[in-house]
Amino acid sequence: MDASGRGHTAAGAGRGGFRAERAPDGRYRWQLKAPNGRVVAVTAAAYETAAEAERGFDGLRVVADGLTARITHVRDGIGWVWVVPGSRNLPEVRSSRAYERYATCQNAFRRFVVLLAKQPALERPEPMERGPSLRTTDVR
């Protein structure tokens, strides 16, 4: 986290990579950026601490190859969004924007999975366990 308490970027993330930020409500949310700086995905869940947000991201990163998404039409407006369901079928992570075409949304999800799998493990001073809101089985 930076000195202002507003965010934490994984080492070497530069323009792309993982970033946890404190929302106006005081809770933390993370986002994943492509190397060009464009936000690819955002967490739908809010976390009490930056460490919890990091654990949530790491949990998804570990099971990236087995993730599936629901692609749905947006309610207000035109377009499609993808959502990865978590525990109790609540959204774990979602696309950062709506896509005009269904196929484009599918491809965006595939690019997210590839980018997620390429992310390095976040460095921590002590080992942390995965939270209950993460997928507990690794489907391969």
Image (cartoon, rainbow, N blue to C red):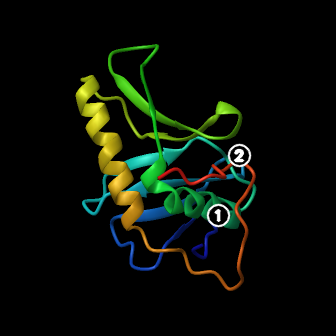
Please say if 30 is above or below 55.
above
Q: Is residue 72 left or right of residue 59?
A: left
Q: Closer to the camera, 1 or 12?
A: 12
- Mark nearer the N terminus (2 vs 1): 2
Q: Residue at x 35, y 29 (%)?
A: 98
Depth check, mark 2 against mark 1: the one in front is: 1
Q: Quadrant of residue 115?
A: bottom left
Residue type, numbered disc 1: Arg
Judging by the rendered image, the residue that carries numbered circle 1 is 55
Q: Residue at x 61, y 70 (%)?
A: 4
Mark 1 Cα within 10 Å, few/some/many (few <14, many 20+)? some
Q: Position of residue 93 (x, y in %)?
A: 53, 43
Judging by the rendered image, the residue that carries numbered circle 2 is 25
Q: Quadrant of residue 57?
A: bottom right
Mark 2 Cα within 10 Å, few/some/many (few <14, many 20+)? few
Please say if 69 is above or below 38.
above
Give the quadrant of the N terminus.
bottom right
The CA distance from mark 2 to mark 1 is: 20 Å
Q: Is residue 103 left or right of residue 33?
A: left
Q: Residue at x 35, y 41 (%)?
A: 109
Q: Closer to the camera, 39 or 136?
A: 136
Q: Residue at x 26, y 39 (%)?
A: 107
Residue type, numbered disc 2: Asp
**From this viewpoint, is residue 62 visible?**
yes
Q: Position of residue 33 (x, y in %)?
A: 37, 57
Helix or strand or loop: what does disc 2 sit on?
Answer: loop
Q: Residue furthest front?
A: 140
Please say if 32 is above or below 54.
above
Q: Position of residue 60 (x, y in %)?
A: 54, 56
Q: Closer to the camera, 115 or 99?
A: 115
Q: Is residue 39 left or right of residue 56?
A: left
Helix or strand or loop: what does disc 1 sit on?
Answer: helix
